[in-house]
Image: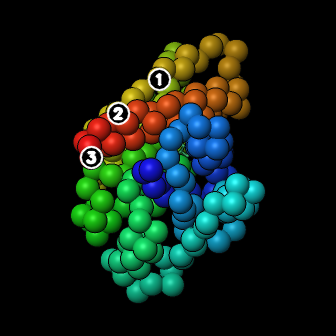
Amino acid sequence: MIRLAVFASGNGSNFQALAEAASEGQLQAQIALLFCDQPAAFALQRAEAFKIPTLTLSPKDFATKQLFETQLIKELAAANIDLIILAGYMRIIGPTMLAAYPNKIINIHPALLPAFPGAHGIEDAFAAGVSETGVTIHYVDSGVDTGPIIAQQAVSIAAEDTLETLATKIHQVEHELYPKTVQLLIEKLEKGRR
Ligand code: GRF
């Protein structure tokens, strides 16, 4: 079975959706690790509830990003991780990690890329007054939210929507689209292995 590491920095609701899909069999992979760069992330408590092993490393404990990523790669290799799923991981993946996991790092972004990249995709779309935004799942490259797109789903913004109702709609779509898309990717990876 493909072994996944999920990376999160905060709440971890997407991690939760992936863990639920895995435990219900819709996602046929083992979530072998939750990695957090924030020791206080709520995602860590969610992982405990699923009995999923966790790892926390604080970049500030390392002299350089390269050293931080080198240590992280060692731990991922020890856990035999095949694929890395970013889920609210608020840190740019550096060249060391990208070289170690080429085309094996996936991210979810709460907007229809290339529109509204960056850390505030939902707020930026709402403030722009567009009638449609959405969710994008993409491969991670060296840019910010620029890698090849794997899947997208639109979410309409109604006149009566507030930032809060929009955020709720976006997260609902995320929680369905991410497990589904990761499952499709895994099926492709497994075909390639046979
Ligand atoms: C999600 O909206 C995701 O698209 C973005 O960060 C948010 C993380 O939420 N990258 P959560 O931590 O999964 O609840």
Ligand 1 near label 1 (Cβ, under 8 Å)? Answer: no
Left or right of 93: which side holds 28?
Answer: right
Image quarter for residue 161?
top right
Position in image of residue 98 (x %, y %): 29, 61
Q: Residues within 10 Å of mark 2 (few under 14, many from 20)?
A: some
* x and y percentages locating residue 59 in the rendered image: 48, 76
What SS does tag 1 mark?
strand
Q: Please name the colour scheme applied to the rendered image.
A: rainbow
For this rendering, which residue is in front, 194 or 42?
Answer: 194
What amino acid is at disc 2? Ile
Q: Is residue 34 visible?
A: yes
**Amino acid at dot 3:** Arg
Instruction: Give the CA distance from mark 3 to mark 2.
Output: 20 Å
x then y, percent, for residue 41: 67, 62
Q: CA distance from mark 1 to mark 2?
A: 11 Å
Helix, strand or loop under label 3: helix
Give the alpha-carbon distance from disc 3 to disc 1, as whole Å.
Answer: 29 Å
Residue at left offset 39%, top offset 76%? 74
- Left or right side of 62 for 173: right
184 vs 117, nearest the viewer: 184
Label 3 CA crowd tier, 10 Å (few <14, some 14–19, many 20+): few
Total count of labels: 3
Q: Which residue is mark 2?
A: 150
Check mark 2 vs ligand 1: CB closer than 8 Å? yes or no: no
Q: Which mark is residue 193?
A: 3
Sequence-earlier tag: 3 or 1 = 1
Q: Which residue is mark 1?
A: 153
Please state which of the two labelled residues, at mark 1 or mark 2, is closer to the viewer: 2
Residue beneath the point at 58% across and 18% down: 157
* 84 left or right, relative to 194: right
Q: Nearer the viewer, mark 3 or mark 1?
A: 3
